Amino acid sequence: MTMVDFTRLARALDDNAALQRRARLANLLLTVKSGEEQIGVRIGEDIAVEPGAASSAAFSLAAGPGVWAEFAKPSPPVGFQSLVAMQRVGHMTVDGDVLAWGRNLLFLEQVFAALRPEASPEKAAPVGMPVIEPIVGRYLRLDFQGKPHRLYFEEAGQGIPLLCLHTAGADGRQYRALLNDADITRRYRVIAFDLPWHGKSSPPPGFEREAYRLTTDGYVDIVTAVSRALGLDRPVVMGCSIGGRAVLHLALRHGEHFRAAIGLQSATHADAGADTRLRDLGFMFRPDVHGQEAAAGSVACLIAPASPNADRWETLWHYMQGGPSVFLGDLHYYFTDGDLRNAALDALDTRKCPLYLLTGEYDLSATPELTAEVARITKARHFEVMRGMGHFPMSESPAEFRRYLLPILDRIAAEAST
C-alpha cells in the first residue's frame, strides 16, 4: 500500500498569496489520523507538520491509510475527490469542533490538495482583440405572489426557446458557455434567469423581514410566470440540481406547456450523506461562519477532479457571492419540500413532454443511481451518465458537457421540424 507523505502539507502555501493570507487568519491546529498514525498540523504564518497528535487540536480528520492513498491520487475515484466527499460517504470521520471544521472547508480542501502530485498550471487561452459576447442581459418586472419583482435574465440566439434553471444558491451565469455556443444558438433561443433573491434579481420589498425558503409551488410558479411573461411558445426547460428536480415537477404539472424537459442531476430526492452534522447546525447562516465561503466549501466535493481549474473556481465563485441564507433557503426545497419520493412520478407523460436525463459520474448528491431510478419510473427518452463529470456540468466542464447535450438538442430540433 502506498503511504501518503503528509509532510507535503507544509508546502501547500508555496506561491499562493491567497492561501497564505487565509492561513494567517485561520490560526488552526488539527490532527490527521491515518490508521494508527497521528500527525499534528499547525496552520498560521506557515504550515508545520509534526508526528503525534496536535495538542489542543480543534478537530481531527480520521481515515484509513488506504483511504488517504485514494484521496492522494492524481485522479481520485468517486467518493475520494475531496475531504468533504470522504466525510459525506463515510470514508473519513471528523471528531471535535465541527463548526471549526465547517468554517475552514474550502481552505482545507486547498491545503490538502498538496498531497496530490503537482499538476501543470493550466494556461488560459488569450482573448486577442477585444470581443463583445452575443449575450444580452435584461430585467423583467412582474408581480409574483402578490409582490413586485425585478428579475434578471440573459439570452442569446434564436429559434426554439431553451429556458435554463440554475442550481441552488447560484445564478444564471452557470449557463455562460451555452449562451456563447454558436452551434446551439443558431437553433435555440437560450434564456437563463436568476431566481428571486439570486444573482442580479432583487428580493421583493420587505425581504429584510422574511426568512427566504424556496418551495415547490413557488419554484414551479416562477418558472411558468417567466415563460409566459416572455411569451415563450412551448419552450424546452433544462435545469440542474434543484433545477433538475424542478423540471420533473414542471413536467408533471405543466407538461403541455413544454416541448421537452432536460434534467441535469435530476433525482426524486438528495442523498444527504453519512454525516449531516454541519447541515443540522445550519452552519451556512451563522454569525460565527462566513456563510458564502462555507456554501462553496460544501459543494466543492461535488465537482469532478478532472474539471478544468478555471471552470471549477468560477463555479465556486458564484456560490461565494450569494445572498445571506439564500443557499440555505434553496436547500429547503431540495431536501424537504421538493422531495418526490411520494409523488406519482409514473404519471409524468413523456409522450406529451419528453424527458432527457444527464447525470455526472462524480455527483454524490443526485447520484447516477438516483437518476437511473427516475429514468426507469418515468420511461425517460434518454438517460446517460456523464463520465468524469460532477454536479455542475454546464459550468464546471462546459466543453465536455456539450458532447452530451448536443445530441439531445439535435433530436429535439429534428422532432420540432417534422
Image (cartoon, rainbow, N blue to C red):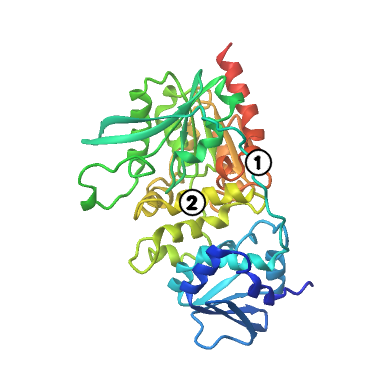
**Residue 5 numbered tag:** none
Tag count? 2
Position of residue 360 relative to residue 114, above or below, is above
Of pointers 1 and 2, the one earlier in the residue sequence: 1
Position of residue 11 relative to residue 258, above or below, is below
**Residue 317 numbered tag:** 2
Image quarter of the N terminus: bottom right
Asked if residue 98 can be seen in this view, the reply is yes
At label 2, the amino acid type is: Trp
Mark 1 lies on residue: 125
Could you say where residue 207 lies in the image, as x and y percent from the top left? 24, 48
Could you say where residue 363 lies in the image, as x and y percent from the top left? 59, 50
Report the residue at 40% width, 63% height from top. 290
Position of residue 294 relative to residue 365, above or below, is below
What secondary structure is found at the residue carrying circle 2? helix
User: Mark 2 Cα within 10 Å, few/some/many (few <14, many 20+)?
Assistant: some
Could you say where residue 389 lies in the image, as x and y percent from the top left? 64, 46
- Image side of residue 59 versus residue 139, left or right: right
- The foreground one among 49 and 335 is 49
Asked if residue 379 can be seen in this view, the reply is no
- In which image quadrant can residue 384 be found? top right
Report the residue at 72% width, 75% height from top. 5
- Image side of residue 374 versus residue 5, left or right: left
- The foreground one among 292 and 232 is 292
Report the residue at 61% width, 17% height from top. 414
